[in-house]
């Protein structure tokens, strides 16, 4: 399968990991929940994990690749206080300041 479209996701957080199995057909995410999140990859999309905090979604159909990347991101969207979560590699998160002490 020749892949034309890519979407890279970065996982930020202590203990947050990803791994792909079954030739890119299954994606397992450890996101700080009590269980592992298991995602089945749709046809015409493949998933690769670089290290254990960078996920690459690739395929020949742009809409399916981006839709699957969005569903992976929705498992743990980035939070605005610490920046932890799953974000696109080129995404910039504006962090909030938090409580001020008097």
Image (spheres, helix red, strand yellow):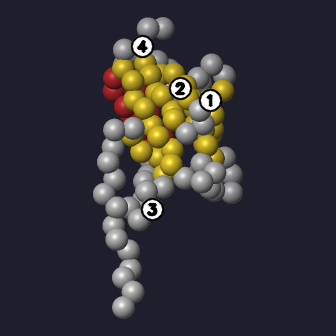
Task: Determine which residue is flagged by label 2.
Answer: 47
Q: CA distance from mark 4 to mark 3?
A: 34 Å
Numbered disc in front, either 3 or 1: 3
Nearer to the camera, 9 or 69: 9
Q: Residue at x 60, y 54 (%)?
A: 14
Using the rendered view, name the quadrant where residue 68 is placed: top left
Please tell me which of labels 2 and 1 falls first in the chain.
1
**Residue 71 in sight here:** no
Q: Is residue 34 left or right of residue 81?
A: right
Q: Is residue 26 left or right of residue 100?
A: right
Nearer to the camera, 58 or 81: 81
Q: Vertical placement of 57 versus 10: above or below?
A: above
- Labels 4 & 3 near each other (Cβ < 8 A): no
Please tell me which of labels 2 and 3 falls first in the chain.
2
Task: Determine which residue is flagged by label 3.
Answer: 82
Q: Residues within 10 Å of mark 2 (few under 14, many from 20)?
A: many
Task: Determine which residue is flagged by label 4.
Answer: 3
Q: Residue at x 59, y 23 (%)?
A: 24
Q: Residues within 10 Å of mark 1 (few under 14, many from 20)?
A: many
User: For numbered disc 1, what is the local secondary structure?
Assistant: strand
For the C terminus, the quadrant is bottom left
Q: CA distance from mark 2 to mark 3?
A: 27 Å
User: For numbered disc 3, what is the local secondary structure?
Assistant: loop
Residue 19 drawn at (x, y percent): 63, 34
């Amino acid at each position: 399968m020749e892949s034309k479209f890519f979407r890279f996701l970065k996982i930020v957080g202590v203990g947050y990991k990803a791994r792909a199995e079954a030739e890119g057909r299954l994606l397992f995410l450890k996101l700080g929940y009590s269980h592992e999140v298991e995602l089945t990859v749709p046809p015409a999309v493949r998933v690769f994990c670089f290290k254990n905090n960078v996920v690459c979604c690739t395929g020949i159909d742009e809409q399916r690749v981006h839709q699957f990347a969005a569903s992976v991101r929705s498992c743990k969207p980035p939070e605005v206080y610490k920046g932890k979560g799953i974000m696109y590699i080129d995404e910039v998160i504006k962090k909030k300041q938090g409580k001020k002490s008097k």
